[in-house]
């Protein structure tokens, strides 16, 4: 069931593969740091990114996954630090582009909510 959910999510989020704002990060490089204001979230094209809180690994994300969306949606500061585990390439999605994607692709918004719900579920079970 989880693989089916991940596969369905990747197909909806795959609209992000065609975005233009691609950034490259070297292994060990910080993408953002806890406490910073959020200007975007990321969709990973290649590589892996670790999410840490106060040096403790919370989650790892790979190609086809998003991260950093919570602070953007909630209009707050980053609750964690994102560090490239490997060399990676990621698409940066700012608030204006995010709102456009939600309007143009209604299932995109649903998948973003599912991502948040799944992460909340996992954090509650630990």
Image (cartoon, rainbow, N blue to C red):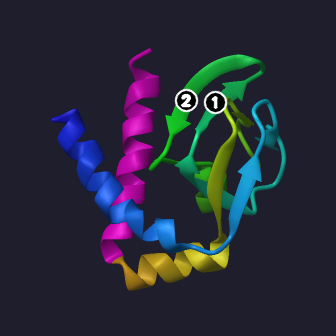
Give the distance between the C-alpha atoms of the residues marked 1 and 2, in whole angstroms.
Answer: 4 Å
* Place of residue 126 in the rendered image (x, y in percent of width and height, measured from the top left): 44, 14
* Place of residue 90 in the rendered image (x, y in percent of width and height, measured from the top left): 63, 54
Asked whether 16 or 117 is in front, the reply is 16
Name the disc covering residue 15, or none. Answer: none
Name the disc covering residue 60, or none. Answer: 2
The quarter of the displayed image where residue 49 is located: top right
Give above or below for 57 relative to 26. Answer: above
Nearer-N-terminus badge (1/2): 1
* Place of residue 34 in the rendered image (x, y in percent of width and height, measured from the top left): 79, 37
Q: Crowdedness of circle 1 by 10 Å Cα count: few (<14), some, many (20+)?
A: many
Asked whether 50 or 38 is in front, the reply is 50
Which residue is pictured at 74% across the width and 52% down the height?
Answer: 24
Taking the magenta stretch, the answer to whether it contains residue 108 is yes
Callout 2: helix, strand or loop? strand
- Image position of 43 (left or right of 6): right
Which residue is pictured at 67% across the width and 32% down the height?
Answer: 86
Q: Are marks 1 and 2 in contact (CB under 8 Å)?
A: yes
The number of callouts visible is 2
Give above or below for 27 relative to 106. Answer: above
| Residue furthest left as drawn | 1
Callout 1: helix, strand or loop? strand
- Which segment is the magenta one? 106-126
Name the disc covering residue 50, or none. Answer: 1
Taking the magenta stretch, the answer to whether it contains residue 82 is no
């Amino acid at each position: 069931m989880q693989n089916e959910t991940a596969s369905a999510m990747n197909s909806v989020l795959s609209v992000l593969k065609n975005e233009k704002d691609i950034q490259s990060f070297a292994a060990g490089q910080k993408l953002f740091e806890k406490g910073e204001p959020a200007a975007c979230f990321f969709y990973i094209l290649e590589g892996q990114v670790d999410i840490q809180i106060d040096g403790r690994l919370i989650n790892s994300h790979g190609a086809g996954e998003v991260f950093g969306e919570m602070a953007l949606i909630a209009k707050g500061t980053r609750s964690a630090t994102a560090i490239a585990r490997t060399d990676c390439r990621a698409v940066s999605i700012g608030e204006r582009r995010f709102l456009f994607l939600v309007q143009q692709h209604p299932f995109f918004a649903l998948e973003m909510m599912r991502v948040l719900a799944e992460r909340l579920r996992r954090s509650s079970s630990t």
